Image (spheres, rainbow, N blue to C red):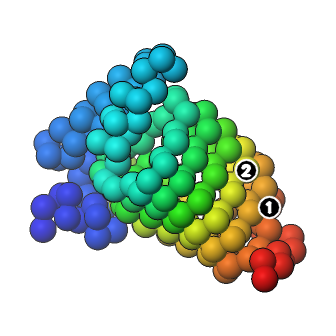
Amino acid sequence: MTEKQKMLAGAMYDPMDPELVVARDRARSLFQKINMMSEAKKKERDTLFYELVGSAGSDLWIEPPFYCDYGENIHLGNQVFMNFGCCILDVCEVRIGNNAMLAPNVQIYTATHPLEAKARNSGKEFAKPITIGDNVWIGGNAVICPGVTIGNNVVIGAGAVVTKSFPDDVFIAGNPAKVIRSIDNS
């Protein structure tokens, strides 16, 4: 397996592999250009966002600044909105469904490191994919940790640290996040 294949499979991989360095540099060049563009160039900025991410549906709206590792591992549904300062470490796939709203400074991290010091100090790392369903609202400064799946119609409170998966139709908040209550979406 190549280092990229290992990375996408969630296995330990070398992030300094030349192919991965080039891919990260491509993403950084694109998001840095996007982040410097004025509102007068929103149409051009939007075109670059569609070039940056792996796939996106209609009506994508991302407020800069925006940050990511690769961009190509981010897959977005229709009518996704991300407010200022969102960061997605897309070492593995990040899938966000339709009608998602991310408040300022939402952080989505697929990247992680071994718990054991010797393995962690090796310079290798790994990742776990993240899936976020349809009609999800993520409050400001929330953190979504590696390997999490969020169901449909979920609301995540501001500042939540989401360390495990949650089903459809719940409001979650806290650190670590827990279900506060169910939401009636009938």
186 or 142, nearer to the observer: 186
Q: Nearer the viewer, residue 135 or 156?
A: 135
Q: Is residue 9 left or right of residue 82?
A: left
Q: Residue at x 52, y 65 (%)?
A: 97
Question: Quick one: label 1 or label 2, which is nearer the N terminus?
Answer: 2
For the N terminus, the quadrant is bottom left
Q: Nearer the viewer, residue 144 or 167?
A: 167
Cβ atoms at labels 1 and 2 below 8 Å apart: yes
Q: According to the image, label 2 marks what residue?
A: 139
Residue plotted at (51% across, 20% down) = 39
Q: Is residue 105 above or below residue 161?
A: above
Rendered position, 97 above or below 41: below
Q: Which mark is residue 182?
A: none
Dot 2 falls on a residue whose secondary structure is loop
Amino acid type, callout 1: Ala
Q: Residue at x 80, y 68 (%)?
A: 171
Residue 140: tell me if it is visible.
yes
CA distance for labels 1 and 2:
9 Å
Image location of residue 145, percent across then percent down: 57, 60
Secondary structure category for the residue under label 1: strand
- Residue 125 point in image, percent of width and height: 35, 56
Q: Is residue 172 above or below residue 112?
A: below
- Residue 99's quadrant in the figure? bottom right
Expressed as whole percent of the image width and height from the top left, the position of residue 2 reads 13, 61
Quadrant hosting residue 180 = bottom right
**Residue 177 at least partly seen:** no
Q: Residue at x 68, y 79 (%)?
A: 168
Camera-near label (1 vs 2) is 2
- Residue underneath mark 1: 173
